[in-house]
Amino acid sequence: MPSPMVRVVSSRTVKPPPRPRERIELTSWDVSMLSTNYIQKGLLFAPPADPTLLVVDHLAAALTDVLAEYYPVAGRFFTDKHRDDRGDVVGCSVSIDCNGQGVEIIHAVADGVAIADAIPPDADVPPVVRSFFPLDDAVNYDGHDAPLFVAQITDLTDGVFVGFAYNHALSDGTAFWDFLNAWAEIARSRFLAPAERPRLTRAPLFERWSPDGGVAAPIVLPCADVSEIVERLSPPPLRERMLHFSTESLAALKERARQELLAAGDTAGAAAVTRFQALTSLLWRSITRARGLAPDQETVCRAAVNNRGRLRPALPAEYFGNTIYAIGTEAVRAPELLERGHGWAAGAVGRAVAAHTDAAIRARVAAWMAKPMVYTLTWFDPYGTMMGSSPRFDMYGCDFGWGKAVAARSGKANKFDGKTSLYPGREGDGSMDAELTLTPEHMATLEQDEEFWAAVSPDAPAPVGKA
């Protein structure tokens, strides 16, 4: 529910140009997401320098154009019931009905809220930020009736927040940010004469992946109605911090891990260690320490990994759909994780990533096909950690025509104790931001962790003024 400070001014449906109706089957990766929340990500901008630019109209016009290429985004889900010879329902499959049903753009105003209120330095993410996102409690199954994509443009006193709600059963974050960047590319081009407007840099690929390389068959879930396996759970109270890690801080974390691995005789691990592994190690160990787990309690670090380049043959980068898995380290008892050190934990993350091969991916697909399921909050491990999103996503490339975003933020969706989402740092050069979610008691303990905060970089002042 929107904050009292945020009021909706208008709403409109945006549709793509007419085209032949089409059905696109969801894969096992897509169907698995039907019970999770929509992706909620957003970008905070300074106001346009041109006071005559009508932001909502500008974005809506560009959205119409990009939907001509990304037409499944404007569709709805459709469920087919599969029956046996007696006519009894034995399962259901879900597809995207691409019939131009449309997406939604909402225009809202946050009375008295400034950029500084939305992104205060060295503080929790303010609750008002959640009100900048639509479809707050929607799960992906709701895409049967609800739009698969909704954008909320919220006017602040000195800025504009563009919040996105995007159905995660439609695609993963890689394809989601490709879609947003395509929208931004078209929005920028609208300042050019029609004859000068370039075609999209990269068009999406909608052909479905299948394990045998043939035409993808419908994925049949063993239920009479998909709604039977959808859960709607509310997480406990959580605190969120957006933490910045400069290029220098990440380099120091990586070098520390490398030196510890060398000292332990793991030369291969030392040579392969990355900044991602080093930051993940820091978070895994620090969160585990803040939780004060029992001595015999095991913990695992998981991370969402893109399958595109790991499959053989590789999937094209333009593949539109979900193709991610959560990989996990070996389980280790909490005291041992802390005793073994930063380098060992970074190496454990590296081993988990390296083990995620074509064969491992196909084995997981086969296991899922033998026993289909959908992800829900009950699947997440209260003793482990989870790394989501990616600093490789081109979030700050989404310039809609009046300049680079001031900050990237997310809504309340898909969050739980121990979840961290990684973002690219605004200044680039390999810096990262980590959006950390913990229960209030665990966050309060983490705030006293000197080792952790020694690695966190001070927040850079937010750019102010018109773009």
Image (spheres, rainbow, N blue to C red):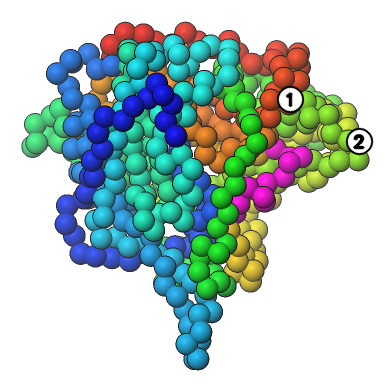
Give the mark, 2 or 1, whose residue is nearer the N terminus: 2
To which quarter of the image does residue 187 belong? top left
Front-most of residues 454 and 358: 454
Asked whether, in this view, residue 315 is left or right of residue 300, the answer is left
Q: Residue at x 25, y 33 (%)?
A: 10
Cβ–Cβ below 8 Å for labels 2 and 1? no
- Which residue corresponds to the image point at 31% horizontal and 8% vertical from the top-left? 465
Kind of residue at badge 2: Pro
Q: Is mark 2 on a helix, strand or loop?
A: loop
CA neighbours of label 2 inside 10 A, class few (<14), some (14 to 19), many (20+): few
At 22% across and 37% down in the image, what residue appears? 60
Magenta-drawn stretch, dominant element (helix, strand or loop): loop
Residue occupying the point 17% across, 22% down: 53
Q: Residue 76, position in %: x, y? A: 34, 57
**Residue labelled with disc 1:** 441
Looking at the image, can residue 150 be seen? yes
Residue identified by numbered label 2: 295
Q: Which amino acid does label 1 sit on?
A: Glu
Circle 1 — which element?
A: helix
Rounded to the nearest angstrom, the CA distance separating label 2 from label 1 is 19 Å
Stretch in magenta: 375-385
Q: Note whether 211 is above or below 169 in the view shown.
A: below
